Amino acid sequence: MIRITTLVENTPGEHLALRHEHGLSFFLEVAGRNILFDAGQSDAFLENAKKLRLDPSSLEFVVLSHGHYDHSGGFRFLADLPGTRRLVVGKGFFEDKYAARNGGYEFLGNDFTRDFLIERSIPFTELWEPAMEIVPGVFVMGSFPRLHEDESINPRFRLLREGQFVPDPFDDEIMIAIDTPDGIVALLGCSHPGIRNMLDAAKARLGKSVRAVLGGTHLVEAAEPGLSASLDYLRSEGIEVVGVSHCTGPAAMKRLGESGMEYFHNRTGSALIIPD
């Protein structure tokens, strides 16, 4: 059985005692192994895990989708807890990330460095390869070919390199792809490189279709015709379950809800259970 619990998302669900915040965090249970995908921006994911009877000390891996604060900021609260867990991030994760706003720049990056990890003897991997299998059937993937030109990145996102602000290509973005007999279960953080680019890469690397998609799609900033193309893609792929949230945006979620697909708004406390 695979169970994916949303520890944190922008919106509250039925369990009103859970904290919600702008961010994302998933607790993944697969074949007796536990993995955290993203950590929100605060300790909310830890507090919610306890209320949902999930044990953070049982985590073997923590995978952070990219270096924005709302996905990586909570890791600092996990770092000093008991247990040994390996952190997996993408290449360039530790670069300084900013957003242009009102003629200036605002820092959006994570609040820890490599030195923070080394000082605490936290093992970590910066993924430079296209894919890495962390437990049997669970792959972390990055280095996504940019095949769909209409999946563009908002130019307001910048990196500070050698004293200069340059466009952020989000080369650090990674995803989790779970290989099941009936297809791929995809966990997405924000999909800055483009949801079609990312899912196409997972399909090509595992040689299977996509069965389920959970997480952020960044369709909130998608312009036409890219938005319609992405929604048509999800519909035409025959995906069984679409549980998107966070940076997907109300317009895209409304259209997904009207599409006839098996869709749900993946909120704080939501759980997807996939039987063996």
Image: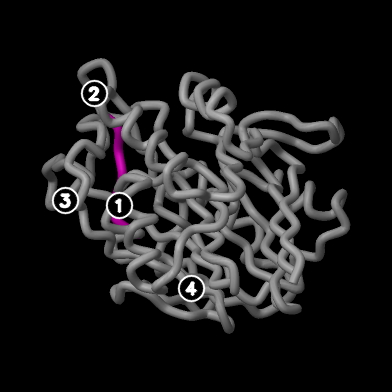
Question: How far across and how far down the image is residue 199, in percent?
Answer: 39, 55
| Label placed on residue 161 | 3
Q: The residue under label 2 is which amino acid type? A: Gly
In the image, residue 130 above or below residue 143: below
Q: Which residue is mark 4?
A: 139
Q: The residue under label 1 is which amino acid type? A: Asn
Image point 20% across, 32% down: which residue?
155
Tell me the SS state at disc 4. strand
Question: How far across and how far down the image is residue 215, in percent?
Answer: 54, 45
The answer to whether residue 135 is left or right of residue 132 is right
The answer to whether residue 203 is left or right of residue 187 is left
Q: Main secondary structure of the magenta part?
A: strand
Query: Marks 2 and 1, how far apart in space?
Result: 31 Å
Residue furthest to the top in view is: 102
- The residue carrying pointer 3 sits among few (fewer than 14), some (14 to 19) or many (20 or more) residues within 10 Å by Cα, namely few
Q: Which residues are magenta?
A: 94-99
Query: Marks 4 and 1, how far apart in space?
Result: 17 Å
In the image, residue 29 above or below residue 99: below
Image point 30% across, 32% down: which residue?
99
Q: Quadrant of residue 136?
A: bottom right
Q: The residue under label 4 is which amino acid type? A: Phe
